[in-house]
Amino acid sequence: MTGPPMLRLAQNERADALLASQPFALLVGMLLDQQIPMEWAFTGPATIADRLGLDTLDPRAVARCDPETFVAMMTGPPAVHRYPRSMGERVQRLAAFVVDRYGGDVSRLWTEPTSGADLLRRLQELPGFGEQKARIFVALLGKQLGVRPEGWREAAGPYGEEGSHRSIADVVDAESLAAVRAFKRGSKQG
């Protein structure tokens, strides 16, 4: 029997192991991936779990946490995100949504859809997930976790292109992280 897939999104062994083994942690990392460096965002779930005294990042525990206590935990120091209050609120809304809609089983988001379009739709329903973030997550699931319902590349849009270095979906090591950063810098200049 094989273990969870290897991910290198956080560029931190412990944080990456949590992302690979805990679907909610991966989802939270994706939520946090805005306006901060990618590896900082994907280290966030491990930091949250540590500060809550949890071995795993359980959506039920996150949803139950007192909102002010959760925001204080997000604030640190160091802060889990550049905007700890608003992102703390978003993480808790995401956790509550996953508990209410999927019974706390995040993997149902990607094990139940029968098409890439359905997967994309489900991801866009998540609090804090717009079209671009949802497309990137479809690409991440397809490229790195083997979640490939029919039409997943089309649902992922340009992020699903084979051999691209556009987003976190393409980060498998330090070299690919540098290539994604270079692509993003080029996109901002163009």
Image (spheres, rainbow, N blue to C red):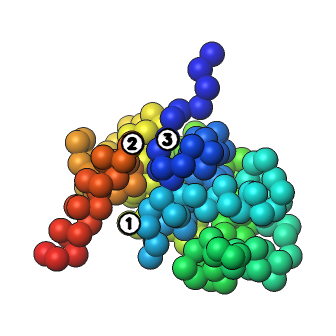
**Three-letter amino acid code at the position of disc 2:** Val
Disc on the earlier residue, 2 or 1: 1
Q: Which mark is residue 132?
A: 1
Above or below, 10 relative to 130: above
Instruction: Please state if 179 lies on the left or on the right of 108 as rendered.
Output: left
Residue name at image x 45 percent, y 54 percent = 137
Q: Position of residue 49 (x, y in %)?
A: 74, 57
Q: Residues within 10 Å of mark 2 (few under 14, many from 20)?
A: some
Residue identifier under label 3: 7
Instruction: Please state if 22 lies on the left or on the right of 119 as rendered.
Output: right
Q: Which mark is residue 59?
A: none
Residue 94: name its quadrant: bottom right
Measured in 3D between alpha carbons, the distance from the residue under mark 3 to the one under mark 2, in whole angstroms, is: 7 Å
Measured in 3D between alpha carbons, the distance from the residue under mark 2 to the one under mark 1, in whole angstroms, is: 20 Å
Point out the frontmost of discs 2 and 1: 2
**Three-letter amino acid code at the position of disc 3:** Leu
Disc on the earlier residue, 3 or 2: 3
In this orientation, which residue lies closer to the viewer: 40 or 144? 40
Q: Are marks 2 and 1 in contact (CB under 8 Å)?
A: no
Residue name at image x 65 percent, y 74 percent = 78
Above or below, 4 relative to 126: above
Q: Residues within 10 Å of mark 3 (few under 14, many from 20)?
A: many
Q: Position of residue 101 (x, y in %)?
A: 71, 58
Q: Position of residue 102 (x, y in %)?
A: 71, 52
Residue identifier under label 2: 172
The C terminus is located in which quarter? bottom left
Point out the frontmost of discs 3 and 1: 3
Can see residue 100?
no
